[in-house]
Image (cartoon, rainbow, N blue to C red):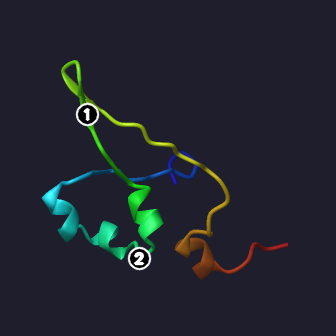
Amino acid sequence: MQNGKRMLTTQLYFAHEPQNEKDGILRSIRDEAQRLSVIREFKPMNEGLQATWDIVIGMTPEDPEQRRKGPPKR
């Protein structure tokens, strides 16, 4: 949380990067389709690189910290 707002954190990986094989987060994604959804081909563009990546934001599991505290009080 920052200033009372939940932060969105994500990670994107370069295709063919040798370090991907050692990355603990990437290796923890067992579903092949999910793993491929965060790996992109980057192509040269002007003085940098370009990739296309669709980000879909929807309902997510509650934070582990929220689970420890229990359900909201009524």
- Which amino acid, by three-letter code, is at mark 1? Lys
Residue at the image position 58 percent from the left and 48 percent from the top: 56
Mark 2 vs mark 1: give the one in front: 1
| Image coordinates for residue 15, horizontal then vertical, percent | 26, 52
Q: Position of residue 16 (x, y in %)?
A: 20, 54
Point 27% across, 72% down: residue = 24
Percent position of residue 60, x then y: 62, 63
How far is the residue under mark 2 from the one under mark 1? Answer: 27 Å
- Find residue 16 and name its label: none
Instruction: Provide the residue designation for mark 1.
Output: 43
Q: Which of 51/6 is in front?
A: 51
For label 1, the SS is: strand
Residue type for callout 2 = Arg
- Name the one closer to the observer, 35 or 71: 35
| In this picture, residue 49 sits left or right of residue 70 | left
Residue 30's disc number: 2
Q: x and y percent of residue 31 in the render? A: 45, 73
